[in-house]
Amino acid sequence: MKRLSRSIEWEILGKDELEGDDLMLVNAAMEATSGSWSPYSGFKVGAAVLLDDRTVITGSNQENAAYPSGLCAERTALFAAGHAHPGKAVTALAIAARNDNGFTAQPITPCGACRQVLAETEQRGGRPIRFLFYGTEGTMLIEGGTGSILPFCFGADSMK
Ligand code: THU
């Protein structure tokens, strides 16, 4: 028998501790919530993706009366980036969300389906994606890449 374990690390940063591209990307994610079409949940999510040449692509959740037809903010941004800039690596992703009471106090983290897409995006780019999950009480910073948010991921290599 072998017993194995793995651990993940993250930091919580106050808004005044964010700087440079991190601050710019979190602000872009907050602004992107304005594009949300979310009449069913009332939950506006914004995502901002940073590419290796510092291009920023944003997205927001787009809902539909046929609920499963909608799409999360993260995948809206990731697929837009993949389409418009297929040769560029995604280096960071920021997300923010608000409801009628304002931005969430705690950061929201991507759903499982978005994590799966992030894992393949990271593999495609060949470098770890930096994550910034915004909340008014602090932003979660994860530098360990998608392995930190989706361990034991299924990917193209799993089929070899
Ligand atoms: N949503 C996102 O866009 N991203 C997340 O990380 C979590 C959930 C959206 C989907 C749906 O439009 C609304 O938030 C409520 O689940």
Image (cartoon, rainbow, N blue to C red):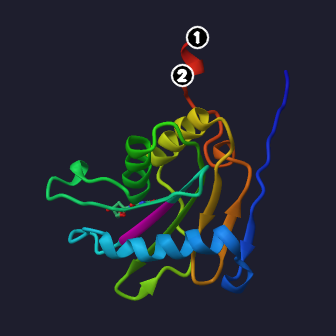
- Residue 75 drawn at (x, y percent): 40, 50
- Which residue corresponds to mark 1? 160
Q: Residue furthest left?
A: 65
Residue 146 picture location, percent across and down: 63, 45
Residue 31 location, quadrant: bottom left
Which quadrant, please, contains the C terminus? top right
Residue 144 is marked as none
Q: Is residue 76 above or below residue 132?
A: above
Q: Residue at x 52, y 57 (%)?
A: 55
Give the residue drawn at x 34%, y 76%. 34
- Among all residues in the image, which is located at the extreme bottom? 101
Mark 2 CB in 8 Å range of ligand 1?
Answer: no
Q: Is residue 82 above or below residue 40?
A: above
Residue closer to the observer: 24 or 150: 24
**Side (left or right) of 14 relative to 155:** right
**Residue 47 in picture, x, y percent from top left:** 46, 63
Circle 2 crowding by C-alpha within 10 Å: few under 14, some 14–19, many from 20: few
Q: Which residue is mark 2?
A: 156
Is there a contact, CB below 8 Å, between mark 1 and mark 2? Answer: yes
Neighbour class for label 1 at 10 Å: few (<14), some, many (≥20)?
Answer: few
**What amino acid is at disc 1?**
Lys
Q: Ligand 1: give its quadrant.
A: bottom left
Which residue occupies the extreme right position in the image? 2
Confirm whether the magenta stretch covers residue 101: no
Q: Amino acid at mark 2?
A: Ala
* Residue occupying the far top of the picture: 160
Residue sitting at x 84%, y 31%:
3
Q: Which residues are magenta?
A: 44-48
Please identify the dominant SS of the magenta region.
strand
Split into 4 quadrants, where in the image is the N terminus?
A: top right
Q: Residue at x 34, y 72 (%)?
A: 43
